[in-house]
Image: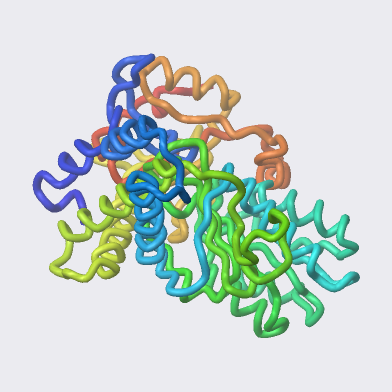
Amino acid sequence: MLHTRKGLIEAVRDRFAHVDHCPFQGPRIFFENAGGALTLKSVVETSAKYAAIPDNQGRDNIASHALVDTIKKAKSDLAAFMNAPSGQFFAGESGTELLFRMIRTACVNAPKGSRVLGSSIEHPASRSAARRWAEIAGLHYVNVPHDDDTGMVYAEDYTRHVTPDTTVATILHASPVTGMGMDVAAISKAIRDVSPDCLIIVDGIQHAAHGQVDIESYNVDGYAISPYKMFSRHGYGIAWISGRLTALPHDMLIDAPAEGWEFGTRDTGAYATLSDVIDYFEWLGGEVCEETDRRARIRAAGRAIHAYEQHLTNAMIHGTGNLPGLADMEHVTILGGEDNPAREGLVSVVVAGMRSPQVVEKLNELGIRTHTRKADHYSGNVLDPLGLPDCVRISLCHYNTEHEIAQLLTALNDMRG
């Protein structure tokens, strides 16, 4: 694991901007990674470089050709990172906007009266899009209830609701509220066992930073990520779509290439920063394995990240050194259970006798950055069934340390309503 290799965590942290210091607050611990991960220093440099270039893609000059090559490289890098040998990648406004576009296209091309299948665990990005466009297209939206106790939805849950006339389905890869990762391949198989031609679209926004994406194994048609949650920057999203979804009639300019899904001139610098991110994963993989193949190194990095983040969440839940863990604190309740192997670097809690915004404020005063999730349009689908008005989301990433966990535990152990 990352923490057993001497000097590796320090080398990892050195590659990220503001890893332990906020430019507005000063020294701080960053446990708000699900709201937007730290940014690689290389991404900052690349963004500045491309922001200064006045040329656009598609012109007959050397600079324009170089920009096109940069975008082609980024798409090739994405294919290696996400194991997507077919289909295409394209950029949009955000991960949410891209989910809406993919789901809209799938719904308006589906036979009237057919069914759209989604789950109550999903982020409103996919749930809102599916419900809205099912109604507009004359389809029936069917909700698959998630398990409130585990904060998950399972393949067998989809099996109970899928029918042969299910033409569109959505899956959440990881929840930004419970932190649990879903078995996308198993859910996809459960859907296709009953409706083989269903168009399946995945929200991978929360999952992508953990480095284990394997589109080829999922048998799906769409997958969206938000690069600012994967060590890049704000301002754009990335989608992958299958050849089947690519070919459907979709929003496009008159007489434009039929397979094009992008609108207007995209930011070459945004694409270039994705290559920086994937280079980082390859570097990290080379530090934890002896492989020379790029995809093998990326996979090794993903495994190491998952194992280390699991180590950190176990330390948070069960304690580290002489400090009690969250599970040992009678005034703390953990959403999704204490020992949930599906957890991906995120623990949401409630502190007895205190509203979550109070807890977040007190932690902020101690230099520990967390976030309140309220039972609103973002998180009510998870919190309302639990009877909770809010919770504290503690989200970490592989550049966090056990020492930072210890500081958090000390603060929460002393925090009683």
**Horizontal arrangement in the rendering, residue 218 relative to residue 33 (left or right):** right
> x, y (%) of residue 24?
38, 14
> x, y (%) of residue 370?
46, 30
Name the one closer to the observer, 325 or 67: 67
Name the one closer to the observer, 241 or 217: 241
The part of the image, by quadrant, that contains residue 130 is bottom right
Q: What residue lies at 47% left-to-right and 60% top-to-bottom?
A: 342
Name the one closer to the observer, 388 or 332: 388
The part of the image, by quadrant, that contains residue 171 is bottom right
- Quarter of the image containing the N terminus? bottom left
Colour basis = rainbow
**Horizontal arrangement in the rendering, residue 225 relative to residue 51 (left or right):** right
Question: Does residue 365 sit above or below 388 in this rendering?
Answer: above
Question: Does residue 140 sit above or below 54 in this rendering?
Answer: below
Q: What residue lies at 52% left-to-right and 70% top-to-bottom?
A: 87
> x, y (%) of residue 308?
28, 52
Name the one closer to the observer, 11 or 55: 55
Give the tally of numbered discs.
Answer: 0
